[in-house]
Amino acid sequence: MLLEINEHNIDQRSIDIVVKALQKGAIIIFPTDTVYAMGCDLRNKKALKQLAALKGIKLSKSRFSIICSDLSNLSDYVKQLSRPTYKLLNRTLPGPFTFVLNANNEVPKMFDTKRKEIGIRIPDNNIVISIVESLGNPLATTSLHDVEDEIKDYFVDPYEIYQRYDSKVEMIIDGGYGNLEASTIIDCTGVDPEIIRQGIAEIEL
């Protein structure tokens, strides 16, 4: 299913359709402020396993990030942030960054793993933020492409994405063309933040 949503004039009825599908365990593809991504309801274990299967891995081996609507509920998933880390997140989000933070004890249970960190995103995109707000909890998310893939046109053109993924996922949201560059990843699990992937966003740490 291809569902068109205008980021600058969002129809709540369309958001409700997406949320109902997510609550039933759907895997969706959606726009962000960087490349298009695929994801599911973080609180749906069956959907998480299906998302991992689409990437050809077991859930316990996944490195999914989560998309939040704001910083208010981060404590549900990460350990207490230092003041400098919180200030960094507060001044850069929403934006095209992924922050790797120390996970709390809930995260390993969700992903059937011993992982001690989790990637956090708050994209500057009204569509995905509206979805997360209406869902009431974050999305688990992963890029359409693999790390070694060159990001090509079919990762940013919603119609091309539809042609390739319609049979693999329940819903694809057409929010217009995406970007060719992924998010900048910043590791905040140590004493000082460190850029571990330079993406679309430039920042001085």
Image (tube, grey):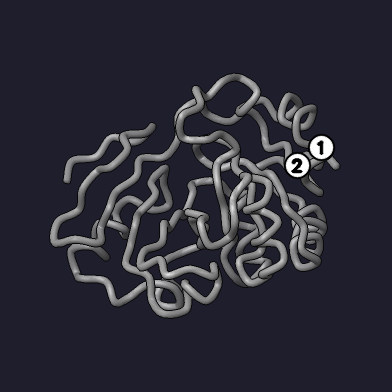
Left/right of residue 189 with respect to residue 31 in the rendered view: left
Q: Residue at position x 66%, y 31% from top?
A: 176
The outermost residue toward the left is 191
Q: Amino acid at mark 2?
A: Ile
Q: Answer with the quarter of the image where residue 201 lies.
A: top left
Q: Amino acid at mark 1?
A: Asp
Q: Earlier in the sequence, mark 2 or mark 1?
A: 1
Instruction: Select label 2 or label 1 by which is in front.
Output: 1
Q: Residue at position x 21%, y 48% from top?
A: 194
Asked whether 26 or 32 is in front, the reply is: 26
Asked whether 83 or 52 is in front, the reply is: 52
Q: Position of residue 163 (x, y in %)?
A: 79, 27
Q: Is residue 21 above or below residue 184?
A: below
Image label count: 2
Q: Answer with the quarter of the image where residue 91 lies.
A: bottom left
Mark carried by residue 112: none
Q: Position of residue 13 (x, y in %)?
A: 82, 57
Q: Position of residue 41 (x, y in %)?
A: 66, 64
Q: Position of residue 200 (x, y in %)?
A: 38, 32
Q: Residue at position x 41%, y 80% from top?
A: 105
Mark carried by residue 166: 1
Q: Residue at position x 81%, y 49% from top?
A: 170
The residue where tag 2 is placed is 172
Q: Is residue 123 above or below residue 35?
A: below
Q: Residues within 10 Å of mark 1 (few under 14, many from 20)?
A: some
Label 1: state its secondary structure.
Answer: loop
Asked whether 190 or 1 is in front, the reply is: 190
**Mark 2 and 1 residues: CB-CB less than 8 Å, in contact?**
yes
Q: Residues within 10 Å of mark 2 (few under 14, many from 20)?
A: many
